[in-house]
Amino acid sequence: MVKSNIVTIVVKAPLKIPKPSVSKVELRVDGVTYKEVKVNEPVSLTAKIYFTTATPSSTTLTMDIYINGVKYDTYTISVKEGVTSTTYRFTLKFSKEGTYKIQVDVY
C-alpha cells in the first residue's frame, strides 16, 4: 500500500468588512423654490450621505424613506470604495393636498 502525502486545509469564516459609519445625512428638495408643488407633480429629492472616514471597500447601504413618520419605501444604495460621501436622488409624488414631512434613515 502506498499512501499519499498529507494536505492541510484551514477553513476560516469570510472576512467581514464593516459597513462605513454614516456621520450625517442632508436631505434637500431639488428645483422647487418654495417647496410647494401641485398634486401628482413629481418632486425630486437628494440625500447626501457623509461617512466618518473613506469607505474601506465597495458596499451597499439601506435607506428608508418616511413620510409624516410612516415608512414609505426602502432603497438600496451602492457605495464605491474610497469615498467620503455619496449622493442618492429619488422622486416622490403626492396624490392629496397637504403638508408632508420627509425624512430618511440610512444604515
Image: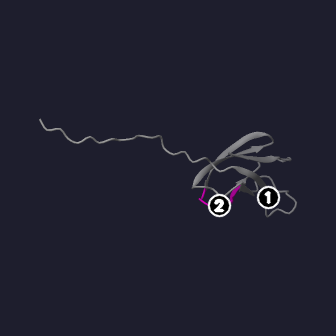
Q: Residue at x 81, y 55 (%)?
A: 38
Residue 63 lies in the magenta-colored region:
no
Picture quarter containing residue 3?
top left
Total marks shown come to 2
Q: Residue at x 58, y 52 (%)?
A: 59
Q: Residue at x 78, y 54 (%)?
A: 27
Disc 2 residue type (three-letter): Val
Position of 8 with respect to 21 (left or right) is: left
Q: Which residue is mark 2?
A: 83
Q: Secondary structure at mark 1?
A: strand
Position of 2 with respect to 47 (left or right) is: left
User: Is 51 above or below relative to 7?
Assistant: below
Q: Which residue is mark 1?
A: 29
Residue 70: assigned label? none
Give the magenta part as a residue range. 79-90
Disc 1 residue type (three-letter): Val
Q: Secondary structure at mark 2?
A: loop
Marks 1 and 2 close (CB-CB < 8 Å): no
